[in-house]
Image: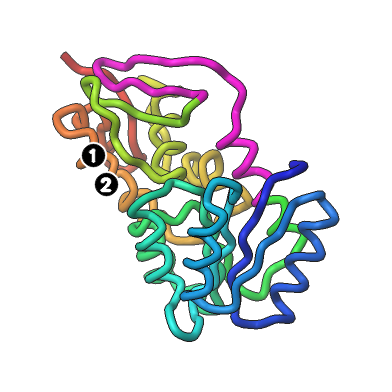
Amino acid sequence: MNNVTVLVVDDESRMRKLIKDFLVQKEFCVLEAEDGERALEVYQENQKEIGLILLDVMMPKLDGWSVLRQIRQESKVPIIMLTARGEEQDELFGFELGVDEYISKPFSPKILVARVEAILNRTRGSKNEVKDYGGIEIDIDGRTVKVDGKEVEMSLREYELLKYLMDNQGIALSRDKILNNVWNYDYYGDSRTIDSHIKKIRHKLGKRGKYIETMRGVGYKFEVKK
């Protein structure tokens, strides 16, 4: 991960230092911000270099949700939210706004770094491949999705969920299996998180959203229909 820059946003200097120390050990470059307003300033000044953002929720001046909304208006940079709450509704709210990963405090710094590396590995894939599924075109290299030739904005998690369904076309996938393969790291949240993401993906796919079938009592299946 050499030369990848991570922006760490947290109002606790001790927390920023802890995260920075572990990231630097893995040869990441680290930028810091102590509140939401400063985070947006640092992001604007370095957005071409920043490869991922670790963003605390509860901060002075401007909270993490507000920062997330503003950044998502112009960028799909991977964002991991850090929060002390760890409540289901907070997680669902974060995913609705375009969060790529969600980690509740307290957490293991080593696990945090592992998640950072995993997300960056997925977003910086080397496969130069484009697949078409009945009008839905997915670019593996660029991590983009087009529907009938028009690009559709998707968060990293939405993209990965759609890709997983497509890779298993015609197979009924349980919610537990989807959580294990898309969310990873033994996600313990409510499976309704998947339902929320599916709803958003269907909406973004328009008439192609019918390709994602709800399998009653099981989960979901992707199948191209004429």
State the image quarter where residue 22 is shown: bottom right
Residue 36 location in percent, x, y?
Answer: 48, 75
- Residue at horizontal 81%, vertical 50%? 26
Secondary element under disc 1, as helix, strand or loop, is helix
- Residue at horizontal 19%, vertical 30%? 210
Residue 167 located within the stretch drawn in magenta: no
18 or 87: nearer the eye?
18
Q: Which residue is mark 2?
A: 200
> What span is in magenta?
116-141
Q: What is the distance, in whole Å, between disc 1 and disc 2 at their CAs?
A: 6 Å
Are the two marked residues, 1 and 2, in contact with CB atoms closer than 8 angstroms? Answer: yes
Residue 134 location in percent, x, y?
Answer: 25, 15
Q: Which mark is residue 95?
A: none
Residue 140 located within the stretch drawn in magenta: yes
Q: Quadrant of the C terminus?
A: top left
The answer, for residue 92, to whether it is visible in the render is: no
Q: Which residue is mark 1?
A: 204
